[in-house]
Image (cartoon, rainbow, N blue to C red):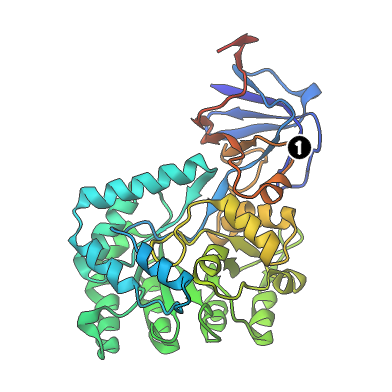
Amino acid sequence: MSLLITNIGELFTNGTRHLTRDAAVVLDGERIAWVGAATEAPDADERIDAGGAAVLPGFVDSHAHLMFAGDRAPEFAARMAGEPYTGGGIRTTVGATRSASDQELRDNAGRLVREALRQGTTTIEIKSGYGLNVTDEARSLRIASEFTSETTFLGAHVVPAEYQGRADEYVGLICGPMLAAAAPYAKWVDVFVERGAFDEDQARNILECGKAMGLGLRLHGNQLGPGPGVQLAVEMDAASVDHCTHLSDADVDALASVTVACMCHEGWSRTVATLLPGAEFSTRSPYPDARRLLDAGVSLALATDCNPGSSYTSSMAFCIALAVREMRMTPAEAVRAATAGGAQSLRRDDIGVIQVGARADLLILDAPSHLHLAYRPGVPLIRTVISGGRVAFPTAINRMHDGVPL
């Protein structure tokens, strides 16, 4: 079944063409078959008239922690009253997650995935990291794999209470039985490289073990203060280093040094810096300086960091608005980071773009331009979500079949 989306006011492609009026896209099954001017569009089985609205790729949320139970609203309230964020509340969620049934974890993750989809997220990465034992890490990833192919083993989130003072012993558990049980359900391995979590040597060991099991590499780095995360990520050719709040000049230079040629863009970094402004919003922390990274030629992604403790949002549009207001990104840069940037951080070229052959993941806004995502923060501007060529979120636009309203 083919679908023509026509009368597009602005087509934000992330590709070589950015059409600003009267554009059209043809979808054929799960793929994009044609992009161009509406006057030249081929026929299709069905039609959607965008009514002059903007169309852009589906959001790619490349950093989310959805495998958990419970919430930490009191912790948020305490931070808003002036208490500092330390990351220690993770252990509260570990207890709730271990106690939850498979169905409770599945229901909560499904609720958040649907919530994200309604807000335009068509690809989402889901991490484990609230089980922190062999059984609960493996089951978290098994359930996560029901919702996405982008699953990440984060057994190295923090050292659990039962291993306090024995971090190296816990690293041995991660690299042995835990990784063996989790790897069949995971695509990526991640480590929280931070004071109070895992040091550089421990992180390198875990990443090397994950790589030996065939997993791609990701890192949490430089969130709470300066540290070795960014340098380690670049050294090990990790796909992404996430947070990047506290960066030295050497960190920025390292990320810029791995920029390579790309057919669609001026260049992109082998190790993408993924910024998570929802975490800074929720923890009253300094925001990363995205402008500094962009000016150095570093590729950026934006993601929600959706989790119950430090960033309980599933809204990529909210993160775009924060990036523009607080991190010195232009609206176009922020939208690109939330789409193509996220795709790059997952090392995928089939999502985050509107071009022939790409996956048919598109958003129709209730607005004439991508600018409105930052210009009108907090307003639900996602009118229609198309995922894999199918309308996944209801539309108020007149949908047509052979010229007859459906």
Q: Position of residue 403 (x, y in %)?
A: 65, 10
229 to 92, vertically: above or below: below
Picture quadrant of residue 160:
bottom left
Q: Residue at x 79, y 38 (%)?
A: 19
Task: Work out which residue is located at the far front of the displayed protein and give it.
Answer: 81
Residue 292 visible within the image: yes
Q: Position of residue 22 (x, y in %)?
A: 79, 29
Task: Work out which residue is located at the far bottom of the displayed protein and give it.
Answer: 165
Picture quadrant of residue 57:
top right
Of residue 176 and residue 336, the one placed in the foreground of this image is 336
Number of numbered discs visible in the structure rendering: 1
**Quadrant the C terminus occupies:** top right
Q: Relative to 335, is 112 on the left or the right? A: left
Q: Position of residue 346 (x, y in %)?
A: 52, 59
Q: Residue at x 66, y 38 (%)?
A: 356
| Residue at image mark 1 | 10
Residue 147 visible within the image: no
- Assign a secondary structure to mark 1: strand
Q: Residue at x 59, y 50 (%)?
A: 317
Q: Residue at x 21, y 64 (%)?
A: 98
Residue type indicated by callout 1: Glu
215 to 338, vertically: above or below: below
Q: Position of residue 89 (x, y in %)?
A: 34, 73
Of residue 293 and residue 208, the one placed in the foreground of this image is 293
